[in-house]
Amino acid sequence: MTRTLPAGLSVTARVPASSANLGPGFDSLGMALGIYDEIEVRTTDSGLSIRVEGEGADDVPWGPSHLVVRAIERGLEAAGVWADGLDVVCRNVIPHSRGLGSSASAVVGGLAAGCGLATKLDPALATGSDQLVQLASEFEGHPDNAAASVLGGIVVSWTETAADAGNDGAAATDHGRVYRAVRLDPHPTLRPVVLIPEERSSTAHTRGLLPEVVPHGDAAFNVSRAALAVVALTQRPDLLLPATVDRLHQIQRAPALPLTTSWIARLRAAGIAATVSGAGPTVLALGTSDFPAELRQLAAIDGLRVVEPGLAEGVQVH
């Protein structure tokens, strides 16, 4: 039986950006970055009020179709509660359509807020991180960005069908997939830097550039480098440069991302492990020392905003 939340309950969810793939870990590796959106939700007697501040304020629908609103409602549904009215305020800082997981962050923040409201009613209704990963990944279709925003740090994520899941097959939803993730503790010296262009990129477009079939040699190459990436990110940052080489998606997307591609080559030539962040066009640079001032100045000339966000913890609700 669905329980109705009383008016006057409120929560705030603070959710980090994320970078996916990290080079060879296509749709599997992710990292939470210290750029945050904030979602404030209060239950009311009736209706829906939504306000969007910052990134995307002029580009997204302010109504029931808004991604955050849909995620809040899904979080309420998953917890077995409902609200007759909602007042929602989104304060967005994460750049949209830049490869920094803005849609995943919106979904994770909305779900966490909805689940948080349920917990305010009854602590027994609290939602675990595994369920949040599952719910958020159902929106996204893959768990790398979503899992990073839920768990924080660095994540390894994967997808199972009900048959693959064995005894846990019951965890699969109507989507027929079980989304899983584990958090890795990053090496304490790891310092991510993102170079964010003004231009935007469509994930659907850049994903459409990828071939349906890849050569066996390329697949084997990426398996070895993705495994090495886990070692480099957690224990051996001196191996970051070879650990971030990819053959499955970056070369294929390069024609659509000329500035991104040229900067990845420039950084790697300087000994800095650089990759496309998600579907781009942001560049992710991974190192253990200060980002060179000369490169920072050249990036600014090319219209790239250099940000050192640090690694983030997962979504927080209060």
Image (cartoon, grey):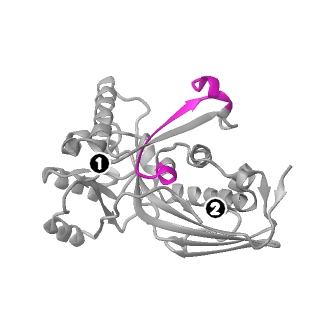
Nearest the eye: 146 or 98:
146
**Left or right, 289 with reference to 72:** left
**Left or right, 184 with reference to 293:** right
Nearest the eye: 305 or 203:
305
Nearest the eye: 71 or 97:
71
Which region is colored magenta?
A: 148-170
**Left or right, 190 with reference to 139:** left
Q: Residue at x 18, y 50 (%)?
A: 268
Is residue 159 part of the magenta span, yes or no? yes
Labels 2, 1: front one? 1
- Disc with the residue nearer the chain's start (2 vs 1): 2
Residue 70 visible (yes or no): no
Looking at this view, name the residue that lies furthest to the right.
1
Residue 180 visible (yes or no): yes
User: Residue 87: horizontal and vertical position, in percent?
Assistant: 70, 73
Q: Return the residue at label 2.
A: 113
